[in-house]
Amino acid sequence: MHKIVSGINAVRENIKEDKGIVELFIAKGRKIERLKEILDLAREKSVSIKFKDKIYLDKLASGSPHQGIIGILGTYRYFHLEDLIKISRERKDGGLLLAADHITDTGNLGSLIRTAVFFGVHGLILPRDRSASITDAVHKTSAGGSAYLPVARVVNIARTLKELGDEGFWIVGAAGESTTHIYEFDWRRDLVLVLGSEDKGLSRIVRDKCHHLVCIPRFSHLDSLNVSVAAGIILSEIVRQRRAILSEGSL
């Protein structure tokens, strides 16, 4: 079965970033004007281009919207944990990694990736089992963001968090019952932000590996947020604090 990336944004960004698209399928009769940039990139990178009946693309995409364009992947290339550590160490404003504690919904994972890229996260850690992986649905929901965020899959996320702690990263978990608001916490350090699933939150074993737990202040009766929304709120505060220090340093 083909591994695919579908939709204009996802295909464009994956070709641009050399993320493994080896062949491009375009629906016959599709207006080419919107696809000109993609076609130019495909020719530049020697990606094969084929025109297929729309019904063929519908079947390949399993009925999900594809906007008349599908990229065929060789294989998605996950990073090693050591790669993410190295990338983080190279950033002057401190390392910033995300760890997802068994997020199984592909839509939530895609949205989380899009949010992470927007705020400049250096990498994402996923458990190999009981977790969504990088699929076409994730590529599409991330609107091409998956082409820019290094993702590592690990066998045991709790053990990985301990290893990152030993490497000097501060492991911070998001948990609604915490008494420390995200605006009270000092985010100016190498850190891993750990997010749990929307329904279950952080697992006990992962929670035990966190150096600190933080919460987003709540002002209504709702007691939870979509994981990508929660990530966006927390990452916004992290970026605000780090940019403030950089601004002070330049005075």
Image (spheres, rainbow, N blue to C red):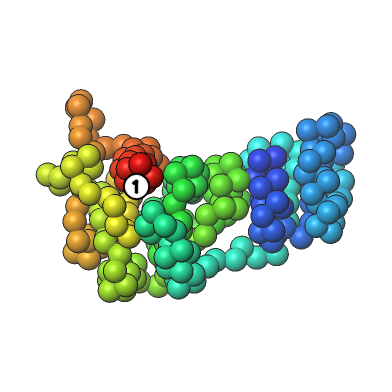
**Mark 1, residue position:** 249
- Determine the residue located farthest toward the top in the rendered image: 220
In the figure, residue 240 lies in which quadrant? top left
Q: Is residue 114 left or right of residue 45?
A: left
In the displayed orientation, state which residue is furthest to the front: 251
Q: Is residue 133 left or right of residue 173?
A: right
Quadrant of the drawing holding the C terminus: top left
Q: In this view, does 224 lie to the left or right of 45?
A: left
Q: Is residue 234 above or below residue 208?
A: above
Counting from the top left corner in percent of width and height, residue 203 is at 25, 58
For the point 15% across and 45% down, the residue is 180
Nearer to me, 5 or 193 = 193
Q: Is residue 80 above or below residue 147?
A: below
Residue 247 in the image: above or below residue 160: above
The spot of residue 188 in percent (x, y) is 29, 52
Residue 122 or residue 243, whichever sits in front:
243
Q: Where's the N terminus, which quadrant?
A: bottom right
Quadrant location of residue 170?
bottom left
Can residue 14 be seen here? yes
Q: Specify the amino acid type for callout 1.
A: Gly
Residue, x 60% and y 66% (percent of image)?
77
